Image (cartoon, helix red, strand yellow):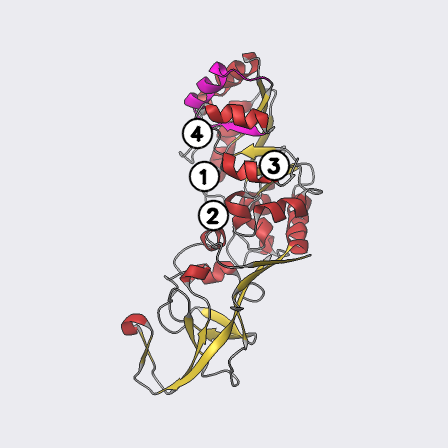
Amino acid sequence: MRPTRARIDLARLRGNAALAAARAPTSRLMAVIKADGYGHGAVAAARALEASADAFAVATLDEAAALRDAGIEAPLLLLEGPFEPADLVEAQARDLTVNITGPEQLAWLEAARLPGPLRCWLKLDTGMHRLGLDPADARDAWERLAACAHALPEVACTHFARAEELDRPETGEQLERFLAATRGLPLALSAANSPAVLARPDTHLDWIRPGYLLYGDTPLPRNHPAGDGLLPVMQFESAVIAVREIPAGDAVGYGGSWVAGRPSRIATVAAGYADGYPRTTASGTAVLVNGQRAPLAGRVSMDMITVDVTDLAPVQVGDPVRLWGDDLPVGEVAEGSGTTGYELLAGMPARTPREYTG
């Protein structure tokens, strides 16, 4: 068996959810498990969190259907709402909640012929400018939903564009617009994403919607104490499959982008971009070999990477390698890849086996 795998600790997932709930003790918790639970397995995540989350959120009807088919009965929100009128029929049949994010969706719902009620959220665009109704139209939209015989409006929500940038005013400005637009409406309110859950208690309102933080990496600057206590749920691991000595001046990997400045020992590891380790990762990015940091050396291949282990105690074929997880946050690896930990986790391919504990 190839040694590359993602080990998922569901006890840590529950612990991170408990941390989020403790930060917002008067709010209900909606766990965001879209993109296959940020690469961790949506069904496994939902089963682990059923006792602690008040609801779950996904992006698409297919994601929701997979959870319902697996026996998940908790309230389940479609964050992007319906993509066509027929989705409303399927959502009602599967007891889903839909986000109404634009005038077209509102009109579809009014015109729909549904055999029963459909729970809905109302999304307002307070500055993200991606999805959502104009805040000025919030009251009219709520009145139309309230007048619709098969619509059950429950919550108004918005989404922050820059909540992780704690020194900027935009989050506070968005919150003010949201509260002004919803004042007097008989709806619960939801605004806080992961960084706001951790560091902006004024945004917690009635529902919090943590996603990324549940999986154990901080969305805030790495040294900010609000992220303390989160534990990585995924250990992305492999093993050394070859070790070789190369002279100074020799290049390693495709394109010869890394050249040995001294006689060097190079370990080849069975993991590449087809396994979820990004091709854009720069030489020098840390990899843990036998628990010790060593720098990536050369371009990431489809199935393998090469690591400079010259300064480590002797490394042998079969020695364990951690690509991210304990002592090596996925966000740190993402910085060396020119992206975010969100992308690395959500992009974890099906080829990489998941092993569950906890």
Q: Specify which label sits upstream in the sequence, 4 or 3.
A: 3
Q: Residue furthest right?
A: 51
Secondary structure of the residue carrying numbered label 4? loop
Asked whether the residues under the numbered discs 2 and 4 touch, taking CB atoms below 8 Å apart as contact, a structural biologist would say no
Secondary structure of the residue carrying numbered label 3? helix
Front residue (pair 72, 158): 72
| Label 3 sits on residue | 68
Q: Specify which label sits upstream in the sequence, 1 or 3.
A: 3
Q: Is residue 111 above or below residue 331?
A: above
Per the rendered image, the range of residues in magenta is 96-115
From the image, state whether disc 1 or disc 4 is nearer to you.
Answer: 4
User: To which quarter of the image does residue 296 belong?
Assistant: bottom left
Q: Is residue 319 above or below residue 354?
A: below
Q: Position of residue 106 (x, y in %)?
A: 47, 20
Tell me the CA gap for discs 2 and 4: 32 Å
**Crowd around label 2: few <14 · some 14–19 · many ≥20 (10 Å):** some
- Residue 117's disc number: none
Tell me the CA gap for discs 3 and 2: 36 Å
Type of residue at label 1? Glu
| Label 1 sits on residue | 170
From the image, state whether disc 4 or disc 3 is nearer to you.
Answer: 3
Tell me the CA gap for discs 1 and 4: 29 Å
Type of residue at label 4? Phe
Secondary structure of the residue carrying numbered label 2? loop
- Residue 165's disc number: 2
Tell me the CA gap for discs 4 and 3: 19 Å
Q: Specify which label sits upstream in the sequence, 2 or 4.
A: 4
| Label 4 sits on residue | 83
